[in-house]
Image (spheres, rainbow, N blue to C red):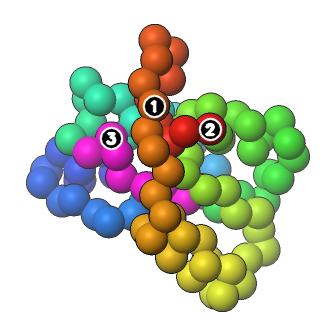
Amino acid sequence: MLRILKGGYNPDIIITNWEMPKLDGIKLIRMIRDPKESPNPYVPIIMVSAYSEVNRVIQARDAGVSEFLAKPISAQLLYERIATTIEHPRPFVKSESFFGPDR
């Protein structure tokens, strides 16, 4: 995905899973949110995962996810999160250890 972003594709939103082959969603989010490496660190990111334990949601939030959806999801719920993410974007914050949507 980062290669696609660096290749000039600029999506309006990214939807990722926690577990993926070769690279997990948390690592992907951290790479996208790195302003030194990513061409668009501000892109909204929705993570979808069956791992909905509080510590996992916090880990995703701390990586820079915009929204988190626990599986199973419905089309209506996904639509609502996409609409909210685009229509009411969270302000971004930058500190020494974090860059991403205001937690």
- Indicate the amino acid at tag 1: Val
Residue 80: quarter of image: bottom right
Q: Which numbered circle lies on residue 41?
A: 3
Q: Main secondary structure of the magenta part?
A: loop
Residue annotated with mark 2: 103
Determine the residue positioned at 75% across, 44% down.
Answer: 57
Highlighted range, magenta: 40-47
Looking at the rendered image, the disc whose residue lies closer to the viewer, 3 or 2, is: 2
Q: Earlier in the sequence, mark 1 or mark 3?
A: 3
At mark 3, the secondary structure is loop
The amino acid marked with disc number 3 is Pro
Position of 4 with respect to 56 (left or right) is left
Q: x%, y% of residue 27?
A: 51, 35
Neighbourhood count class around disc 2 (C-alpha, 10 Å): few under 14, some 14–19, many 20 upward: few
Query: First in sequence: mark 2 or mark 1?
Result: 1
Q: Residues within 10 Å of mark 3 (few under 14, many from 20)?
A: many
What mark, if any, has residue 15 been given in the picture? none
Label 2 sits on a secondary structure element that is loop
* Residue for point 70% across, 63% down: 69
